[in-house]
Amino acid sequence: MGGLLDDVEAAGGLAVHGAAAVPGAVELRQALVGAGVPGLLLAKDPTLWGPAAESEAKIRLGWIDTFRRGRELLPQLAELRTELADLTHVVLAGMGGSSLAPEVISRTLGVPLTVLDTTDPHQVAAALRDRLLETVVVVSSKSGSTVETDSHRRAYWQAFLDEGLSEAEAGRHFVIVTDPGSPLEATAREMNAAVVLADPDVGGRYSALTAFGLVPTALAGVDVAELLDQAETLYATLGEEKDNPSLALGTALGAAATQDRRDKIALIDDGTGITGLGDWAEQLIAESTGKNGRGILPVVVESPAAPGAIEEDVLTVTTGGSLGPDTVPGGGIVPHLAVNGPLGAQFLAWEYATAVAGRILGINPFDRRAAIGVPRVHREWAAGLRPAAGKPGGRAAHLPRRDRSGRIPRCDGLSRPLRRGRCGPDPGPACEGEPGPVGDLRVGAAIPALDRAVPQGRATARLVPPDHRRGRRRPAGTRAAVHVR
């Protein structure tokens, strides 16, 4: 443990322990500094990842200082919260990058937020029954064409109308977060819903400190200005050659994968105040680095004693809040890396580190080809479900048919439960759902059919709430939905 305590780089509120001990990290860092990478990245130089990545990187580096645009949103968010003060139940409808950061923020700060990122009809039905007339629905989609999220919007729209609200009254229950000029922005105007436009120069998985992370959590009661302050404090270190913990982290991740054959990362909460950061970082790292047969495989594990947390090809990383002067990092174990600091700094540091690791791996961390393939399949399948002009609710599709026992298959095409509560494509026995009717849900997509449309090997369904699957207790008052990816 002495080595971990001695090997620490701390600045801007963040501390990274153990980075220099990763084989090859010191030499790689010297090469990065020699090439001027810290300063170039701070300056948003799109050439850092090679000519093939330049055009994409040029429009995807806004995350570096997006906290500045985030501050510009604060007056609008305060006004929205005042206008919607009577709507005390905040539901976030969003998938992937649109929902993971808000969930980490709300869980860490103990603020109730219902996250609806599921296509399970039972979960959607349960959400619709929960305090409907007290609900404001934050619909988040960067592209504005995410089929699952649009299905949630249509379901809530119809539910409000079924409760007797006029279209104008129903529109007040929605806040739309999307990029400027997206189809969802136009739909929001038709609905007479509030619209908050996100930073268009930030990709979805890097959007924690943009409107996608700030709007739902601010409406739920989080002081999001504090998160922006934390990010700004760390920002001052990002161009430095020394005292740059984000650079230390990125170099260690890249060195472990390329020099030490540790291309897998076990992400573990250390119990010091940040909850669920690994769930967000898992998507960030996996989607950013998994390119051209190279990458880093992140895995969130329940505890240091969980299988796979400590293996020869695994880099064990603990994450948590700021530590006191006498606190030992690692949460009771001796990890390869321990990353501690406030949540706003953590978001920016992991984004920076992922970009640096991408440079070391020789890949484009902003390439979206893998991320858009499945949504494209969904959009093509749902092409006939677009709402007609002036009809925000759109046309609803049918729910799945019940089998002979009256049950609705919960997976319908996904079968055989796998590790950590997942289902995968397999010819085994079908997963069964709950018996009995689920009500007349006007969901704008045939929910299980979305899973059938995903190419084999890409569909994974989380069938239990993430807190339950990992043996953790959710903060009182939260109702996290089942997650389906």
Image: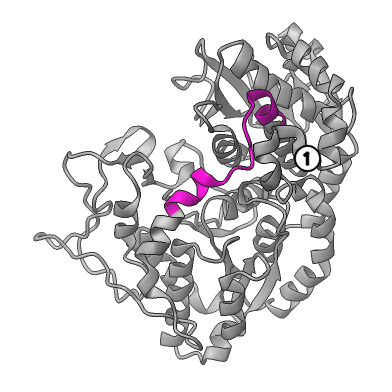
Q: Which corner quadrant of the image does residue 366 belong to?
A: top right
Residue at the disc numbered 1 = 345
Left or right, residue 410 beside residue 330: left
Compare residues 438 and 473 and report the one nearer the observer: 438
The residue depicted at 63 percent of the width and 11 percent of the height is 259
Left or right, residue 378 beside residue 48: left
Give x and y (percent) for residue 178.
Answer: 63, 66
Give x and y (percent) for residue 101.
Answer: 63, 49
Left or right, residue 167 beside residue 45: left
The residue depicted at 86 percent of the width and 41 percent of the height is 43
**Is residue 116 depicted above or below 183 in this figure?**
above
The residue depicted at 74 percent of the width and 30 percent of the height is 340
Residue 255 makes an appearance in the image: yes
Q: Is residue 471 magenta?
A: no
Give x and y (percent) for residue 460.
Answer: 38, 43
What type of secondary structure mainly makes up the magenta span? helix
Give x and y (percent) for residue 446.
Answer: 31, 65
The kind of residue tagged 1 is: Ala
Report the span colored magenta.
356-374
Circle 1 residues within 10 Å: few <14, some 14–19, many ≥20: many
Return the residue found at the far front: 51
Residue 323 makes an appearance in the image: no
